[in-house]
Image: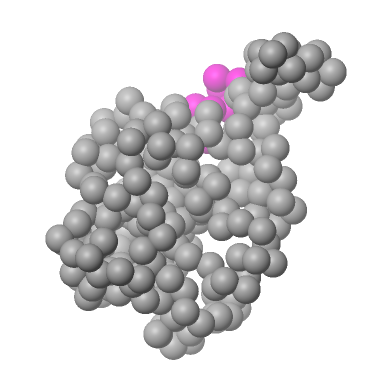
Amino acid sequence: MVKLLADLLDFLFPPRCPLCHAYVDGQGGWCPACLQRALQFHRLPLSVPMQAALTDAWALGVYRGSLRDLIRHLKYQKKRSNLPYIETFLQATVNMPQMQELLAAIDLAVAVPLFPAKEKERGFNQTELIFSSFLARQHIPLTRCLLRIRPTRPMYELNEKERMANLRGAFAVADTAQVTGKNILLLDDIFTSGATAGECARVLKKAGAKAVYVLVMASDHR
């Protein structure tokens, strides 16, 4: 029945590549050239202060161009129809040596949290939506051991000093027993200045985490 419905949807709304819009085989499909162009797994540069809290940081692709619209339309327009494309994109990384090494090193994952009022307004945490199915296939628990305990201003309008002040005291660990001695994968949709990831990692390390790694869907930093 499920396959019949999927076939009917493909007939009524022929699936297209999210980048070039060429016809593809099924919902969530990419044309090979666009998937190869979007998938640019790269290590993110970390400042000296960030290196004290973060063991390593990776992005799966670049933000501008190939992945920008997929993320923004999910995040701001609640376009969940983008999720099959994102899941296909993530699944394409499974056999990459960098991803295998990263996944083998961690015990659990946690998404950068939203303030509860913000999450209620949006209806979801977009980072959890992006990574949840992928992590479930890898048998890696996605926990909510990190909380955002006060609202913060949008980071894009702040300078470096203001960003640090904006984030100070914004995060807390819900249960230190969940993180003590654990290698944690911190997830986010994008990585810009790295200030949010750095503060989350600092809080996790202070609560007893052994190591914190970062994985984001997209970043223009190299």
Camera-side residue of 179 and 17? 179
Residue 20 in the image, given as x and y percentages of width and height: 69, 28
In the picture, the quarter occupied by the N terminus is top right
Camera-side residue of 85 and 19? 85
* Quadrant in the picture for residue 65: top right
Look at the image and name its color scheme: one colour
- Left or right, 203 with respect to 66, comes to left
Residue 119 in the image, given as x and y percentages of width and height: 61, 65
Q: Main secondary structure of the magenta part?
A: helix
Residue 159 covered by magenta stretch: no
Hey, which residue is sitting farthest right in the picture? 12
In percent of the image, x 55 and y 73: which residue is there? 115
Where is 95 relative to 71, above or below?
above
Where is 213 relative to 118, above or below?
above
Where is 120 relative to 16, above or below?
below
Where is 76 relative to 101, above or below?
below
Residue 194 in the image, given as x and y percentages of width and height: 40, 66
Residue 37 covered by magenta stretch: yes
In percent of the image, x 62 and y 73: which residue is there? 117
Span shown in magenta: 31-40
